[in-house]
Amino acid sequence: MRNVRAKYIDAFSQGLARRRAASQDVHAEIRLELNGEKRHELYKLLVADAIERDANGVITAIAFTTSTIGATYLDLPILTPLAWQAVTFRCRTHEFPASHLIAWGNRWIYDEAPPLGAQDGLTGIIHSVSQPEPKADRLVFDVDFGSAPFQAFEELIALLASHIEAVLTYGEPQN
């Protein structure tokens, strides 16, 4: 899994450097609150990788992405190659620790005081957690781990523990 994070951080850093070289008005990791009905405020938050204003004043959100690569982590059931910015968790519903997931997300999404400080020249925060939704007798949610350190991933895995049935990348079959 560390290789998945490293690939994303490299793509993020290089992409941001290229944008900054080409434009003087690029800002990394801007937190936005989206409209919509959600059970908790956390699920409305999205951190854009970067925001850029062009010469005409048009503001564009920029997403830095990577292709998926194979990954392993302890005995975690990783069913597909992964991308750090696009991880789907499929979990058992019985006694799912929803309040713990919210606490974890709130700990890692706010850039005012990232738990471990800046990481790799970036803020050190996750970029989003989707609201867990029932799907085929399981709860499914997505995490964009953004610039968060590997410890954020490890904390989430420890928190979910025996609830995790599968780890995939967005868009992969959810059978």
Image (spheres, helix red, strand yellow):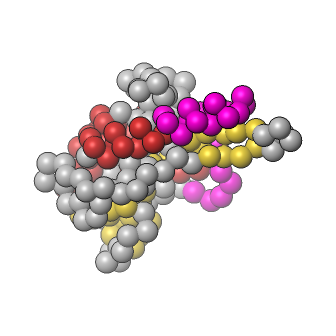
Indicate the position of residue 165 as horizontal and vertical percent values.
24, 64
Q: Is residue 140 left or right of residue 91?
A: right
Q: Is residue 85 left or right of residue 20?
A: left
Regarding residue 78, the answer to whether it shows in the image is yes
Closest to the observer, 169 or 153: 169
For the point 38% across and 24% down, the residue is 116
Indicate the position of residue 124 as horizontal and vertical percent values.
44, 30
Farthest left residue in view:
75
Q: Is residue 74 left or right of residue 95?
A: left
For the point 63% across and 30% down, the residue is 21
* Residue 91, quarter of picture: bottom left
Magenta residues, start to end: 13-38
For the point 19% across and 52% down, the residue is 72
20 shown above or below 48? above
For the point 36% across and 57% down, the residue is 68
Q: Is residue 16 magenta?
A: yes
* Residue 114, quarter of picture: top left
Indicate the position of residue 92 as horizontal and vertical percent values.
27, 64
Regarding residue 167, the answer to whether it shows in the image is no
133 shown above or below 67? below
Closest to the observer, 106 or 26: 26
